[in-house]
Amino acid sequence: MASVTFEKATRIYPGTTRPAVDQVELTVNDGEFLVLVGPSGCGKTTTLRMLAGLEEVNEGRILIGDRDVTQVPPKDRDIAMVFQNYALYPHMTVAENMGFALKIAGVKKDERAVRVLEAAKLLDLEPYLDRKPKALSGGQRQRVAMGRAIVRKPAVFLMDEPLSNLDAKLRVATRTQIASLQRRLGVTTVYVTHDQVEAMTMGDRVAVLKDGLLQQVDTPRALYERPANVFVAGFIGSPAMNLMTLKIVGGVVKFGNTTLKIDSAVLGKTKEKAITAGLRPEDLVLSKNEGIEVEIDVIEELGADAFLYGSALIEGEKVDVIARIGSVSSHRSGDKVFLKPQGGITHIFDVTTGLRLNNDAPATAKKAVAANPAAVAAVAAKPAAKKAAAKTAAKPAAKKAVAAKPVAKKAVAKPAAKPAVKKPAAKKTK
Ligand code: ATP
C-alpha cells in the first residue's frame, strides 16, 4: 500500500496547446478510495493514465509513496488497472484469466492457485473458477476483471469506469461490492467515473475536474454542503442545485416578493452588484404567498419524496426551479405556488469568478480560478444539471431537471462565458 501524489502534473497532448490535465495537485492517502469525477473530456482518464505510466507527464511529477515514478515504466509502478473494457481471454477459464498476470510475472503454480482462490473467495467467484467467460453474467465477468487486479496485490488500484458495461441495477449492486471490497483490502484506489452519484456513494473523497483543472477535493458530504464554486455546486447533487442571479440592493437581495439579507462580510468579498445564489431542492419550501411564484410543470412522485419542477420569473427572466416537497401533494401541472428558502441563501457565489463567497472556499478552487478564471465560472451548471436530470427516475420530470440551465446562462459573466461554454471534444464513446 502507498499514497499517491500528483505534483503540478500536466499533460499536453501533441498537436494541442491547451493542457488536457493542468497542474493537478492531489494527494491520495494510503488506503484511501479517491474518485475522479467530472464531465466528458475533463481529463479524468488522462490523469489516471499518467499515474499508470501510459501517458507522458509534460510538467510536474507523480509519486507513489515516496518514490518518484514520473519516468518509471508502467510494469514497474506496482499498480493494477481495471478498465471499462475488461476484455477477458475467452479461451481461458476464470482461474486462468485471474492468474495470467502472475504466470507472466513468473509466480509459481502453487502460489498462483492460492492467490486466485483467495481473490475468488472475496469476489464470490469460487463456483465459477473452471468456467469460461462466455458462461458468465456481465457482473461475474466484471468481478473476474477485479480478480485479475486483486491477485497481483498491487500498491494501488486504478479503475476507469469499470461499471460502464453493466445495466443500471447491476451497477448499483456492483458499486457497493467494489467499495466494500476496497475497504476490506485497504488498497489505495483511484477510480474514474463521470457519474456523480457513483462518485458520491463510493469515494472516501472525491476530486472534481473540469477542463483539466482540479476544482475541489473533499468528502462527498463536504462537496454537497460546501461546493467551492458554481461548477461543483451544479455538478454535485441530483436533482441539481437551483442557481440564480440575484441583484444586491442595500445589503439585501430580492427573492420574489421577499427580501433576503446577505451577511455584510460575505458581500464584502465581491465587487459585483449581484450574486449567484444556490439553493438545493430541499432548501426551498412551499409557502402561502411568500417568495417566488412558480408555475408547476410536473410533480415527480418518488414515494418517500416528491420533486416539483417548474419555472419562475426572477429579475425579469424565466428560470427553471426544482423543489423537494412532501410526498403527498395536491398540486398539479399548471398550478401556481409560492416557494421560499427555508433559511437564508445556502450557497452564495461570485457572479463573475463563480467562487464561493460564504464560508471560506477550499484552496483548490482558488487555484483553479487563478489558473483559468473562465473555466470555473458559472457555466458549468448547465451540463451538470442535464446529467442530474438523466438520473432522476421519471422521464418527463427528468427533462425538467435542468433548473440550472437558464440560470447558468444568466449567471455567466461575460468574460467567463466564451471559453467556458466550449465543448471539449469527446475522445471516445462510453
Ligand atoms: P470521458 O469521460 O469522455 O472519457 P475524460 O474526462 O476521461 O473524458 P480524457 O479522456 O482524459 O477525458 O480527455 C481529456 C481531453 O484530452 C479531452 O479534451 C480529449 O479530447 C483530449 N485527449 C484525450 N486523448 C487525446 C489524445 N491522444 N490526443 C489529443 N487529445 C486527447
Image: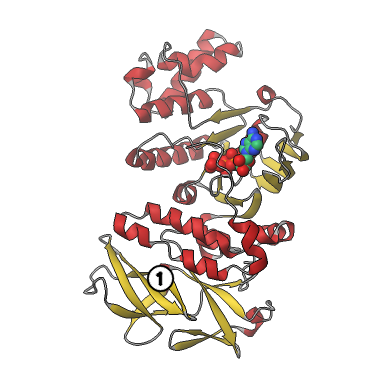
Q: Position of residue 36 (x, y in %)?
A: 57, 45
Q: Position of residue 258 (x, y in %)?
A: 45, 88
Looking at the picture, which amino acid does disc 1 mark? Answer: Val
The quarter in which the N terminus is drawn is top right
Classify mark 1 as within 8 Å of ligand 1 or not, answering yes or no.
Answer: no
Q: Is residue 391 left or right of residue 262?
A: left
Instruction: Give whichever of 419, 28 is nearer the camera.
Output: 419
Say what secondary structure mark 1 lies in. strand
Question: Which residue is at 52% across, 47% downward?
Answer: 203
Q: Position of residue 159 (x, y in %)?
A: 54, 35
Q: Is residue 248 above or below residue 109?
A: below
Q: Is residue 410 above or below residue 379?
A: below
Q: Position of residue 208 (x, y in %)?
A: 58, 52
Q: Where is mark 1, residue-wise?
A: 321
Is residue 48 in sight in this rendering?
Answer: no
| Residue occupying the far bottom of the picture | 250
Question: Which residue is at 42% across, 11% downward?
Answer: 91
Quadrant assignment, res 68: top right
Is residue 82 in sight in this rendering?
Answer: yes
